[in-house]
Amino acid sequence: MNKNELYRDIPKVDVLLESEAVAGLIGQYGRSLVMEAIREQTERLRRFIRETEDETAARAELAGLTRSIAAYLKTLRQPRVRKVINGTGTILHTNLGRAPISRDQAQKLAEIVTGYSNLEYDLEGACRGERYAHFEGLLCRLTGAEAAMVVNNNAAAVLLTLSTLARGGEVIVSRGELVEIGGKFRIPDVCQQSGAALREVGTTNKTHFSDYQQALTDETKAILKVHTSNYRIVGFTESVDASELAGLAHERGLPMIEDLGSGVLVDLEKYGLTHEPTVQESIRAGIDVVCFSGDKLLGGPQAGIIVGRKEYIQRMKRHPLTRALRVDKFTVTALELVLLEYLDPDRVARNIPALRMLSETEQSIRERAERLRELLKQSCHSADIDLRPCQSQVGGGSLPMERLPSCGVSIWPWAMSTQALERRMLDMPVPIVPRVADDHILLDMRTVDSEDLPVIAEMLGEVLG
């Protein structure tokens, strides 16, 4: 194998630029990007020749240089954030974007954000307005709160609340509620950043009302209750109800704050799920400030929603952090569209994808699984395709103990390993993220939409046909 000869056979840049194929790429991508692609791919080819001893493979790489340049350019122009098909059965999958919004909401969102909008313009008064005005009335109507505002996530909501109401003093929190959320963000860290001193009370598994009473001092600025939405302590446990703590806080003239975490506006028990405290229940219990996420059980975009007493919310709106934590026009618009769905309690579970997946029956999921199985049997001739009962989970730090009976499509490839098939699925034009169980690929159909079934069958057919 003469490597020097192979190096000499690599076309020069000017020769490549004059070729018909590359000239077409210049027209499509521009000269500077094409030059970058040529340099990158010719250098990659030199490395390949240097490291290989297979002349046939090296010649094949030489012959495919123009195709490699075109593929590199296509990759450069392709967005890194892409639609994926969620076959994991985890409804609020943090790594996959948590709650999806509906196609109808997305179309309305596109109509608004592709042009100008009245984001901070009062059309009635013909003057500057407030971005919170678009959804504050809705949130108050749905939750019973006096006022509302939104920041970019729930950690930011807690940070802003404590910075406004407890900075320079102490905030009392149960040791059993010092949660850590994704990415190693912890309640003690958020508290420290707010400028409030954390006053821990009770123990990991038991905190009594008297613990809060004894912790109150002249330095106390607030009492904080944190809903442990991403884990459960069971067995020998005790905690204090938020309404009791609200009474204690109000006796001392202190704000009572509750971080509800996931946040939910409907009673999940009617869908056969474990009861999850609703925002409305917290407001009725006398909580002054309630914080929760927008992209979890609410089913909307990422946001930290703050509702409660007007005097406290108004102070937060004026806080310097609010400017740094504020939401943009995409979030404002998407959140309002999602909240509007809650005005019709009878249709909300159908119109919000996360709630629809939570409430879907096992039989309905099985019917969708059967449709996919039949499509796969027509397109995939080198794999075993079967139905398999499975269990879905809520995810996103919500209802951690809840398991939802579901049905999956099991795929066992004949001519490649399960791991190789999983890799191929992640590399597809529309990536499919599956579960792997017992050396089988499993697509939990609770999180797979009907309109994606033909796409799945076509893409898998190209690999397993």
Image: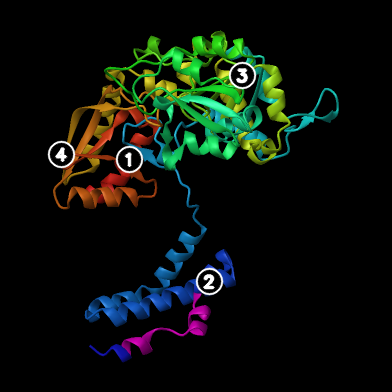
Residues marked 2 and 3 touching at CB (< 8 Å): no
Cα separation between marks 3 and 4: 52 Å
Question: Looking at the picture, how far across and down is residue 299, in whole percent?
Answer: 49, 26
Cα separation between marks 2 and 3: 61 Å
Residue type highlighted by circle 2: Val
Mark 4: few/some/many CA within 10 Å (<14, 14-19, 20+): few
- Indicate yes or no whether the magenta region holds residue 18: yes
Secondary structure found at label 2: helix
Of badges 3 and 1, nearer the viewer stands 3
> Is residue 229 visible to the viewer in this orientation of the structure?
no
Residue type highlighted by circle 1: Ile
Q: Is residue 207 above or below residue 126?
A: above
Cα separation between marks 2 and 4: 46 Å
Secondary structure found at label 1: helix
Q: First in sequence, mark 3 or 1: give its number.
A: 3
Q: Please identify the quadrant where the N terminus is shown.
A: bottom left
Q: Which region is colored magenta?
A: 5-21
Position of 381 compared to 33: left or right? Answer: left
Q: First in sequence, mark 1 or 2: give its number.
A: 2
Which residue does the numbered mark 1 point to in the structure image?
Answer: 456
Position of 73 compared to 441: left or right? Answer: right
